[in-house]
Amino acid sequence: MIILGIDPGTATTGWGIIKSYSSNGKRILKLVGYGCIETPKETEMSQRLVMLNQELEKLLKREKPDLVVIEQLFFGANSRTAMTVGQARGVVMMTAASLGLPIKEYQGLSVKLTLTGYGRAKKKEIQEVVKTTLGLEKIPKPDDAADALGVAICHVYKG
């Protein structure tokens, strides 16, 4: 199964793709790719959302994942950030759904708990688990891409 993990944002949307399969009764996870979709801050929000849609659609058509996994929105103190992230999440969900892809969602707390056993784990701890789980020499950069890979790995562990 090919899984695309998404860490949504309007300035930067992280993505990470893993392949999950069984070999001799053991679950194997392999890195396929990762990166970010970035939109210019000086561009109007409506155009940034269009750019996100277009770039994500290209990625989905090129990589052909079986499933899209997206991090759910955490409502912290900054409601403005929550609103823009919510808009990006909506675009991601609409784009994936329009291509007929199933979507799963996980809260950040759940991702942290699943990957580290501790729901309040630090970002660096999650990144180390991603690196180790995928057998990488270094932590994927930027952070948004590593977070997206963490969401995809979480789905495999919960699935």
Image (tube, grey):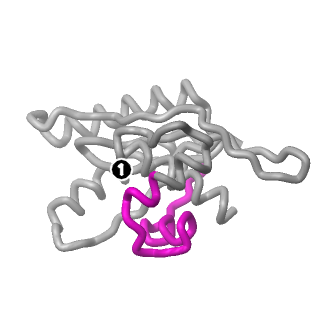
Work out whether 30 lies above or below 158. Answer: above
Residue indicated by mark 1: 8
| Residue depicted at 23% across the width and 42% down the height | 11
Dot 1: element: loop
Answer with left or right where residue 124 lies relative to residue 28.
left
Image coordinates of residue 17 in percent, x first then y, are 56, 39
**Quadrant in which the C terminus is drawn:** bottom right
Which residue in the rendered view is the most extreme toward the left?
A: 42
Q: Quadrant of residue 4?
A: top right
| Residue depicted at 17% across the width and 33% down the height | 40
Number of numbered markers:
1
Image coordinates of residue 44 in percent, x first then y, are 12, 38
Image coordinates of residue 72 in percent, x first then y, are 41, 63
Work out whether 6 lies above or below 154. Answer: above
The local crowd at label 1, few if under 14, some if 14 to 19, many if 20 or more residues have their Cα within 10 Å, is many
| Residue depicted at 28% across the width and 41% down the height | 12
Image coordinates of residue 144 in percent, x first then y, are 36, 46
Is 113 covered by the magenta stretch? yes
**Quadrant in which the N terminus is drawn:** top right
| Residue depicted at 65% across the width and 42% down the height | 66
Which residue in the rendered view is the most extreme toward the right?
A: 24
Between 34 and 135, the residue placed more toward the observer is 135
Three-letter code for the amino acid on which mark 1 is drawn: Pro
Is 78 covered by the magenta stretch? no
Range drawn in magenta: 102-127
Work out whether 21 lies above or below 70. Answer: above
